[in-house]
Amino acid sequence: MKLDESLAAPVHSLADDDAPMHELTIEGLGPCEVEEGTRLVRAIEDCGAAVGHRCGGQSQCTTCRVEFAAGEPPVMTEAEYDKLTDIGRLGEMRLACQIVVDRDMTLTPLMTVEDQGWDDAGPEPALMVEPDAEWFSIETLEQR
């Protein structure tokens, strides 16, 4: 399958001093500034919410699930699409481990350390989206 480059989320180095900043608003915590290109699961933690990532951000466990109120990206990875389809939740939530911040976003983490009673959120996710981070429009993924 070929990547639709017109829809691909931009990825910038986290060390890019010129990267634009975006406002990430987390329900119950309020807004914080996040550098464009930051992996959403890491941005949520950096902003103070202990969102789950029990599989280490590999799109396997779905504990990084979020619900968007605004700013939901129109693209997703095949891994996210396949996992949400497998569990029957496509269109109801997104996986923060498969999203890169490229716009202002308002969201609610649906599974946190506190509300699940975990000792920790899980293994630390990598800086970049894994596995095989290629983004496609949802319509493209539905037609494959």
Image (tube, helix red, strand yellow):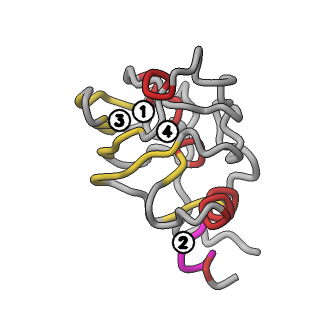
* Residue contact between numbered discs 3 and 2, judged by CB atoms under 8 Å: no
SS type, badge 4: helix
Query: In the picture provided, is 83 more to the left or to the right than 67?
Result: right
The answer for how far apart the CA atoms under marks 3 and 1 are is 4 Å
The answer for how far apart the CA atoms under marks 3 and 2 are is 24 Å
Residue at which label 4 appears? 40
Q: Is residue 130 above or below residue 93?
A: above
- Kindly report which numbered mark, 3 or 2, lies closer to the viewer in this rendering: 2
Give the residue type at disc 2: Ser
Give the residue type at disc 4: Leu
Residue at which label 2 appears? 137
Q: Earlier in the sequence, mark 2 or mark 4?
A: 4
* Residue contact between numbered discs 3 and 1, judged by CB atoms under 8 Å: yes
Q: Is residue 135 visible?
A: no
Q: Which mark is residue 21?
A: 3
- Kindly report which numbered mark, 3 or 4, lies closer to the viewer in this rendering: 4
* Residue contact between numbered discs 1 and 2, judged by CB atoms under 8 Å: no
Give the residue drawn at x 62%, y 67%. Answer: 85
The answer for how far apart the CA atoms under marks 3 and 4 are is 13 Å
